Image (cartoon, grey):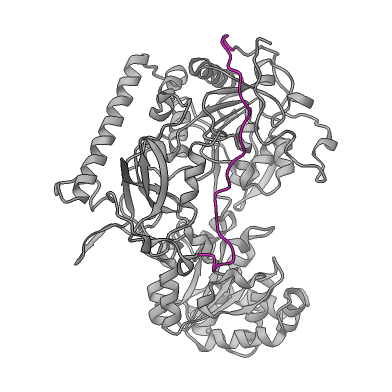
Amino acid sequence: MERRMSIATHWGSFVAVVDSGRLVRIEPRHDDPAPSPIGPGMVTAAEDSARVLRPAVRKGWLDGEPRAHGAARGADAFVEVSWDQAITLVSDELRRVRSRYGDSAVFGGSYGWASAGRFHHAQGQLHRFLALGGGYTDSRNTYSTAALEVILPHVIGGHPWSYQSRMPMWDEIAENCELVVAFGGLALKNSQINPGGLARHRTRDLQRRCREAGVRFVNVSPIRGDVAGFLDAEWLPVIPNTDTAAMLGIAHTMLVNGWHDEDFLRRCCVGFDRFASYLLGELDGIAKDAAWAARITGIGRDAITDLARRLTTHRSLIMVNYAVQRADHGEQPIWMSVVLAAMAGSMGRPGCGWGAGYATMDATGVARGRAFVATVPEVPNPVPDFIPVARIADALLRPGEVIDYDGGRLTLPELRLVYWCGENPFHHHQDLHRLTRAWQVPDTVVVHEAWWNTSAKFADIVLPVATSLERDDFAAGFSDPPPRRDAEGPRAGGRVAYRSPHLRCPGRPARVRAGVHGVALGERVGPAPLRADQGRARWRRRLAGLRRLLAALHRRAAGADRTGSRQFRGPALGPATFSPGDAVGPDRDLLGGDRLVRLRRLRRAPDVVRTGGVARRRSVGPVPAALDLEPARLTPAQPVRQRGPQPRFEDPRS
């Protein structure tokens, strides 16, 4: 008999159809106007043979061999061990590194989104665990918007992310704006996602409303398709990484023609006189006029002049996408876009001025603020050390080096143990060959992972984890609007309470789903150890409380319980119905029909041989902080992957 239940992901909320404990299909919610086609791909991934089913340890690490040649991370074989053995290895190694090198030698930044659940928030749980054990070196900023986060507080003030609630929303743009200039485009495909999940995708319909209201769009991007076709946007193809030069050419045209907003610049800005001297070439002898910008950007001089005129004669909004700041000196296009908006004369008007990140996540520009969301209580980190998130390779390869950061000087710490949960650093780092070389440096790399991806294959100890399809949780997306009621009854907003389909995954032990291994590990490295039975009982009580909360939210959504919880106001998403008419069709293709987004089926892993013996790491003494690897092994002409798509497993008794 089929059962239907709500599930939450970073790319939206769906309905899982389960028959006899097996996931049959994943369907869009009936009230999602633009569901992502990514969701159905979870069906094949949930029980794929590439799942990590048991704890595994890299054979070379277990044998104490140096990380070179065949024993290097990413090329070595793995040995499967029991949970008790794996927990002993991790706890002993954490204790060894802390006692010998200090707490700052443990890197626990563990950057990444992981899954959408608030209780099973991988980074938050790891940070709490490591902080209770003595502390760790953290990471700061994000791969997505690091330059923006650092520069904006110096330019417009406020918190690095406060611009999200200060910039115009889509409904304000539709009502008040006449011209939108999007540097980096407005790729609608990116709005499929939202950190923490989302109830309904609304960016597409809000953009369509802007166009129907008469708002004109200009796409300044190397790619014509970086905006939706229904926006009828004018395309100004720009050479990558020359957005700042284009903005300077527009600003110079405004200045020399007297089109800029002198009153706003005088009353609300500081330093424009010096900037004007730079534009005119008084500081370096180079006037940043339209002709100068045209030679650099590839945009015609007349097009630059015309855009400057339209920006100052229409109620305008300058948008800048996150992509333009992911480059060397990435703070410049962000800073310059604010200057250009200040000159254009629309700053401070409803629906106009400046904004960033539109369509990069669905909630951006949809609603200000967010509903209150419960989180696992944080624990202060006793270690003050941190690194900028994208400097992980630098920290591993050059510990002790002093770098510039946010107007100051920062010393990179010596990292001996890397602990990563819920993300794959090889998925988003900027130089994978260099990261591969750096990843050989630390003594130990511990990873919690559901599949044998690159992160797992380049680890020393891999602990299997459950997917969001195999656990109960509640989700609340970043800036996703709060729930509300209307004439049609309960309407879902930013919170999704969902039950796990509890899929049957062959070989997956129950304690993986329950998370008991986290308690056992905490018993061995935490400051106040618990007896095993006490720790497990405490987790059972917490999980039971979470299940009661979820059950109450489901009853409330169905109208059976109106009392609810003071902390979780608003209806939860109960089981939804689905009709063939709600299927994703051509009119719901977020990619304009050019291509479909599908979760690629993972390649199958080979058969494994389990060990019956007790695994203990052989002691080989201290490991050097840096290794002189053979450069020929990591030349760009050769692939990073040294072996097949899945790791080899060996029996340590052989």
301, above or below 426, in the image: below
The residue lying toward the viewer, choosing from 3 and 45, is 3
At a point 23% along the width and 45% down the height, the residue shown is 553
Q: Position of residue 154 (x, y in %)?
A: 54, 61
Q: Is residue 165 left or right of residue 337?
A: left
Q: Is residue 127 left or right of residue 237?
A: left
Q: Quadrant of the C terminus?
A: top right
Q: Position of residue 376 (x, y in %)?
A: 36, 37
**Residue 270 visible to the viewer:** no
**Toward which corner of the image does residue 183 lie, by quadrant?**
bottom right
The residue lying toward the viewer, choosing from 492 and 98, is 492
**Residue 19 visible to the viewer:** yes
The residue lying toward the viewer, choosing from 370 and 405, is 370
- Looking at the image, which residue sits at the far right? 632
Q: Quadrant of the N terminus?
A: top left
The residue lying toward the viewer, choosing from 330 and 400, is 330
Answer whether residue 471 is magenta in the image.
no
Q: Is residue 434 left or right of residue 635?
A: left
259, above or below 30, in the image: below
Q: Position of residue 265 (x, y in %)?
A: 52, 79
Q: Which residues are magenta?
A: 590-615
Q: Position of residue 285 (x, y in %)?
A: 78, 77
